[in-house]
Image (cartoon, coloured by chain):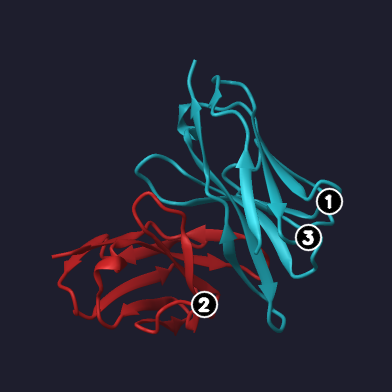
């Protein structure tokens, strides 16, 4: 059974870079049917998509975060990572990683069918 | 950018009631819509994709419909375990997503 696990510091100082890793177990990150994504949820608020990556390294980012976000993949470790630079208190959130299914006949369907448990990141000095 | 709205923002209904949540896109998105359920303190769960296709394992009391700009999620008979916030999510012809603001469902 596929599982995703987020890891990284729970506390980041303002203006620094938030770095998280998602480890995929029970399946290969290099499957052609899937992208991999990051989503966040500030306390008491809704879900915000951050970005998606394919095992080849192809990426898509939320335009509102694009200037600060880098998502990368390490197929040898079955992991993908998120870096968010110049963080402020507004970046305090639960960060989720998720598997993004890509299928059907073109144009393809995309949806997030497996999620990690989430990790809380607080931005504070 | 295409914006997603949901109505109502919250609702309270009795066990056994039929519940309908609406999601609207500011431009037509064909059937590129998914619905997620997030129970309090829990991880979001996929319910429906392609506007009306039920994800495997999801109870049949959940259904989705719509195309273009207007979509609905219906719970045919509300159960206590359905207390949650429901989010619609659009996708493009690429894994680029926008979530709706959510609809919180409670039991009256």
Residue tagged by mark 2?
Answer: B55
Structural distance between the alpha carbons of marks 2 and 1? 28 Å
Residue at 57%, 52% in the rendered image: A116
Q: Which chain does tag 1 point to? A: A
Chain letter, colour red: B
Provide the secondary structure element on which disc 1 rests.
loop
- Label 2, secondary structure: give it: loop
Mark 3 vs mark 1: which is more N-terminal?
3
Which disc, if any, is residue A28? 3
Residue reaching furthest to the top: A125
Q: Position of residue A61 (x, y in %)?
A: 66, 50
Could you give the CA–CA distance between mark 2 and mark 3, rounded to whole angstroms? Answer: 22 Å
Residues at marks 3 and 1, CA–CA distance in whole angstroms: 8 Å
Whether labels 2 and 1 belong to a single chain: the reply is no
Q: Chain A appears what colour?
A: cyan
Circles 2 and 1 in contact, beta carbons < 8 Å: no
Q: Which mark is residue A75?
A: 1
Q: Residue at x 68, y 56 (%)?
A: A36
């Amino acid at each position: 059974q596929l599982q995703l696990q987020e890891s990284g510091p729970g506390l980041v100082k303002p203006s620094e870079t938030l770095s998280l890793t998602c480890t995929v177990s029970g399946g290969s990150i290099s499957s052609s049917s899937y992208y991999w994504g990051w989503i966040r949820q500030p306390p008491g608020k809704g879900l915000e998509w951050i970005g998606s990556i394919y095992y080849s390294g192809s990426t898509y980012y939320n335009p509102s975060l694009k200037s600060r976000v880098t998502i990368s993949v390490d197929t040898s470790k079955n992991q993908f990572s998120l870096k968010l630079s110049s963080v402020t208190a507004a970046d305090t959130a639960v960060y989720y990683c998720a598997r993004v299914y890509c299928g059907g006949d073109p144009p393809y369907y995309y949806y997030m069918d497996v999620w990690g448990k989430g990790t809380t990141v607080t931005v504070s000095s | 950018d295409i914006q997603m709205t949901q109505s109502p923002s919250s609702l309270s209904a009795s066990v056994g009631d039929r519940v309908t949540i609406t999601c609207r896109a500011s431009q037509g998105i064909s059937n590129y819509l998914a619905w997620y359920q997030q129970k309090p303190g829990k991880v979001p769960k996929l319910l429906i994709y392609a506007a009306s296709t039920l994800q495997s394992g999801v109870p049949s009391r959940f259904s989705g419909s719509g195309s273009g700009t207007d979509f609905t999620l219906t719970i045919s008979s509300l159960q206590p375990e359905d207390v949650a916030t429901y989010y619609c999510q659009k996708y493009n012809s690429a894994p680029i997503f926008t979530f709706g603001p959510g609809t919180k469902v409670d039991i009256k």
